[in-house]
Image (cartoon, grey):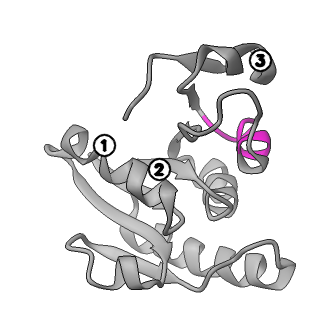
Amino acid sequence: MKIALVCSHGGHLTEILHLMEAFEDHETFFITYDNFRTINMDHDKYLLENIGTNPYKMFKGSLKILKILLKEKPDMIISTGSEIAIPAFFLAKFLRIKTIFIESWCRVKTRSATGKIVYYFSDEFLVQWPELLELYGKKARYEGAVI
C-alpha cells in the first residue's frame, strides 16, 4: 500500500515519525513544509511553503498537493495535522483516497482547528484521549495514545 504522510514540520512531524514502524511494509512519502527539520529528512518527501492561515497560500498549496497526489497516486493519506491536512483531505475525497486523521496528543480537552474541519472529510478519525470522544462525535475513535 502506498501511504502519503501529511503533516506540518513541528510537533505534528514528531508524532508521525513515532509511527514510522507501523508503515514498514508500505511505501510512504511525506507532504510537509520546507524547514530545517525536513530538508535532510531521510524519507521520500515533497516540501511546500508553509500555508498557515493565509487564503492565497492555502490555494497555492492545494494546487501543489493536487499535483503530488495525481503523480504519486497514494492509496491512503494519514495526517497528524496541522493546516496542511485540510487541502490534502479535501482533495482526497474527490480523488477517492482513503484518509486517517490522528488528533494531536497534546489535544486533551479541546478540538484542534484542523480537527474540526477534517473530521468531516476523514474516513477514520482517531483521538488520543477519551475525553475528546464526546467533543467530536460518533466518527471519532479512541484506540489509545500512539506515542
Does residue 103 appear to the left or right of 110 in the view shown? left
Q: Residues within 10 Å of mark 2 (few under 14, many from 20)?
A: many
Amino acid on which the number 1 mark rests in the picture: Leu
Residue 118's place in the image compared with 86, above or below, is above
Q: Marks 3 and 1, Cα distance to the nearest angstrom?
A: 25 Å
Amino acid on which the number 3 mark rests in the picture: Gly
Q: Which quadrant of the figure contains the C terminus?
A: top left
- The magenta segment: 115-122
Residue 58's place in the image compared with 1, above or below, is below
Residue under circle 3? 137
Q: Secondary structure at mark 1?
A: loop
Which label's residue is closer to the chain start, 3 or 1? 1
The residue depicted at 14 percent of the width and 43 percent of the height is: 25
- Which sits in the foreground, 17 or 5? 17
Number of labels in the image equals: 3
Identify the disc placed on residue 77. 2
Identify the disc placed on residue 19. 1
Does residue 137 appear to the left or right of 93 in the view shown? right
Which label's residue is closer to the chain start, 1 or 2? 1
